[in-house]
Amino acid sequence: MTNVRKVISAVASATFAAAAAAAVIPATAHADAHQVTYTVSSPNNLTATVNYVSSDPPSQAAYNADPSKFMTSVQAPLSGGAPVTYTATLANPAQWASITASGMLHWPDSGNGPAQFHCEIAVDGQVVAHQDATTTVTCTGRG
């Protein structure tokens, strides 16, 4: 009878250990989240419309159906090359990280010509994308 108790005790311990390990797995999955830093700047004096992905969509279809559910849109005053930054935590920044900035010059203090923009995406402190453009600039984590 003692051997039966030992076997039952061992099985119960193994079952408890497996259940405890299963309970820990979801907490570990959160550790895969990445800190995404979006940066936009312009040498011009302007107010930019900035749109960036702030949360992971569950699928491409969900994103295509309503991207505004997963994006943040702000009006950002830019001047003299001073950057503005925004942060988000994304599980899959290679697929979803994206920022777009566009705007018009403020006359007369910015002169004539198109607005100039620079954008950058850093994931966990490492720059993964940057772009310079006039009128509208877009950076994506897809490279």
Image (tube, helix red, strand yellow):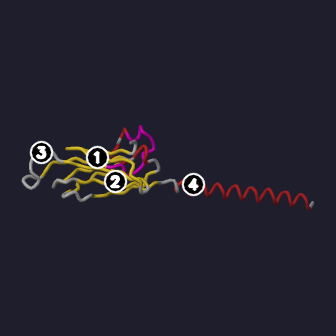
- Amino acid type at image mark 2: Tyr
Residue 26 circle label: 4
Circle 4 residues within 10 Å: few <14, some 14–19, many ≥20: few
Mark 3 to mark 1: distance in Å?
20 Å
Quick one: label 4 or label 3, which is nearer the N terminus?
4
- The stretch of residues the image draws in magenta is 52-63
Callout 4–callout 3 Cβ contact below 8 Å: no
Circle 3 residues within 10 Å: few <14, some 14–19, many ≥20: few
46 sits to left or right of 8 = left
Residue 127 circle label: none
Mark 4 to mark 1: distance in Å?
33 Å
At horizontal 9% and vertical 51% (from top left) the residue drawn is: 111
Quick one: label 2 or label 4, which is nearer the N terminus?
4
Residue sitting farthest toward the left: 108
Please tell me whether mark 4 or mark 3 is closer to you in this view. 3
Quick one: label 4 or label 1, which is nearer the N terminus?
4
In the picture of the structure, the residue carrying the numbered disc 2 is 38
Residue 126 image-quadrant placement: bottom left
Q: Secondary structure at mark 3?
A: loop
Mark 2 to mark 4: distance in Å?
28 Å
- Amino acid type at image mark 1: Thr
Q: Is residue 54 magenta?
A: yes
Residue 100 circle label: 1
Callout 2–callout 4 Cβ contact below 8 Å: no
Residue 113 circle label: 3
Residue sitting farthest toward the right: 1
Please tell me whether mark 2 or mark 4 is closer to you in this view. 2
Mark 4 to mark 3: distance in Å?
52 Å
From this view, report whether residue 119 is shown above or below residue 84: above
30 sits to left or right of 7 = left
Q: Secondary structure at mark 4?
A: helix
